[in-house]
Amino acid sequence: MNIFGFLTMLGGLALFLYGMNTMGDGLARMAGSRLEQILEKLTSTPIRAVLLGAAVTGVIQSSSATTVMVVGFVNSGIMKLSQAVGIIMGANIGTTVTSWILSLSGIEGDSLWVQMLKPSSFSPILALVGVVFLLFLKDEKKKDIGTVMLGFAVLMFGMETMSGAVKPLADVPEFTHLFVAFKNPVLGMLVGAVLTAIIQSSSASVGILQAMCATGAVSFGAAIPIIMGQNIGTCVTALISSIGASRNAKRAALVHLYFNLIGTTIFMVVFYTLNAFLNFAFLDSAANVAGIAIVHTTFNVAATVVLLPFSKGLERLAVLTIPDKHTDADEPDQKPQTADVDEGMKLLDERFLDHPAFAVAQAKTAAVDMAKLVNEALTLAIPLYQDYDKKKVQTICDIEKRVDQYEDVLGTYLVRLCAKPLAEHDNHVLTTLLHNISDLERMADHAVNLAQNAQRMKNEKADFSKKAQAELQLFSSAMHEILSLTFMVFENEDAEQAAKIEPLEEVIDDLKEEIRTRHIRRLAKGKCTIELGFALTDIVTNYERIADHCSNIAVAVIQMDEKEHDVHKYLGQVKTQDPQFAQMYRMYKEKYLLN
């Protein structure tokens, strides 16, 4: 091989790695938030956890990504270590899908249909379709499909380029002797582990090995130890990810390492013991791409079958390696997990930032948890003027502090996520969340205002007149309806239901003005006091401002659906030109008509 052949090989390797990365990114974006839903459906059944790990890894084409996410879940306390073990085992099986895809390049035959199955035949078509999808289609999902197609085509082109570049090496004695040396199991495993640790992808390193098969110098005797080492090397990514994480997260990364180490040891001992007696003839024959895929899959499936019954043992081994310690001074690497840390904030692990589509879904779940807290605070606060409860006031104040913490942590996380490459829909979700968490935090502040107003009325032993109470009761009903609608719309991103909020908010504005006008009349007639007037004004003003924030959330959801960004333009058009708005406004006006 001359210098130009060497450069061609490097170029093929670069295209291969880039294509794999691009295809994986496209698949991850397509899976997006569904990954969260899949991973949440965990059960205590180890077999289901294995199948789940295999399925997720098969979708995103990266066992490293799956194990890093698992480490993040365990670190956040969302997933137990026992649940992680099965998923990690399944991830090792799922990663073998890539080697089977690459094995298509080894298909041989003269038939037209057989030739069309070869990647060199259909990859150019996929590349062309992918480019068309990316350049000329606006639908984000189709663009992701185009990214996957183009990534696959680049991947296969890189594979073919590498294979073609290394073929002349078959006539180089030094190269063939090198692979003879790899027949030494320990040396072969070491080479496979180091290569995989460097590129941090067992799928990619197996693909490189498959490309090397084109030289005919790679025998099964040399390939098998390298494949074993590649399974060990892929553990490096999860181990790096666990640095600075909780003890259980580190244990999850160690489970991944121990699974591959023990599985490899058992496989190698059994295999070479049998070879000593049976003398496997195929070890001296040249390996091919399909053979590499078979060995890769056989090992991972066999290791899972053997070690799955002993998953508790792997878990205990990890605990023995990183034992529990009983003093805070002994745990400098342990993040404090206090009782007041909400489950939603535990979702915001920085490890997920390397998988932006998944991180956006986690952030949305955390924001929904924040919204539920706000809803709880408002539900407690609205009736307090009528039925005061000191414990509820304290609960509302505690919730408000938690909501403030949510805004700080979630806001910081979203800002960091802004710097990541995001699909159009995910970018809209992120922008909407950045706006909405501020509205949610202000709504919690208004809940505290209502609670403090009720507390002052209690201390002053002040009560509204029956007429004022009836008016506030009707106003409170309108508030409960708009809040119920808003939180449902926010959670489900339901633009159709969101359209009902703005007309109701207009009616709430009208109610505020009407109740204040009626109070002034009662004050003029001496039927009410100025002090009660202040209390009443405080309540209706907080109601109206809460409704304004509900409107902001609804408009943000509608804009995300319609890709409209001018708020004032949208509100102006909908209030003056939308017949549906006028119809709903009349309906709510009749429903909440003061007597």
Image: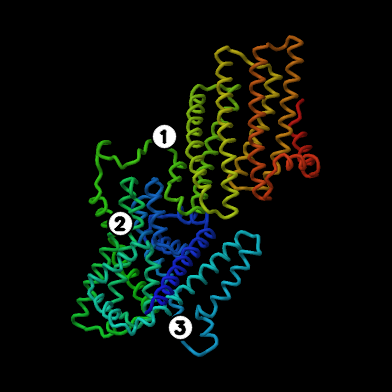
Point out residue 65 in the picture as x, y percentages from the top left corner: 42, 58
Say few, some or many: other residues with alpha carbon within 10 Å of mark 3 (under 14 / 14 to 19 / 20 or more): some
Can residue 97 be seen in the rendering of this structure?
no
Q: Amino acid at mark 2?
A: Val
Residue under pointer 3: 107
Dividing the picture into quadrants, the one containing residue 1 is bottom left
Q: Is residue 78 left or right of residue 191?
A: right
* Labelled disc at residue 340: 1
Left or right for 115, reference 252 = right
Compared with 587, 33 (above or below) is below
Foreground pick, 23 / 406: 23
Provide residue 308's location: percent of width, then percent of height: 31, 63
> Element at badge 3?
loop
3D distance between C-alphas at marks 3 and 2:
37 Å
Which mark sits nearer the N-terminus, 3 or 2? Answer: 3
The residue to which callout 2 is attached is 255
Residue sitting at the far bottom? 110
Q: Can I make out residue 53 in this image?
A: yes
Q: Residue at x 55, y 87 (%)?
A: 112
Q: Which residue does the image show at 25% across and 44% down from the upper left?
A: 324
**Marked residue nearer the N-terminal end (3 or 1):** 3
Disc 3, disc 2: CB below 8 Å? no
Residue, far top: 526
Q: Considering only order in the chain, which callout, 2 or 1, is on the residue closer to the N terminus?
A: 2
Q: Is residue 279 above or below residue 447?
A: below
Q: Is residue 254 above or below residue 202?
A: above
Residue 420 badge = none
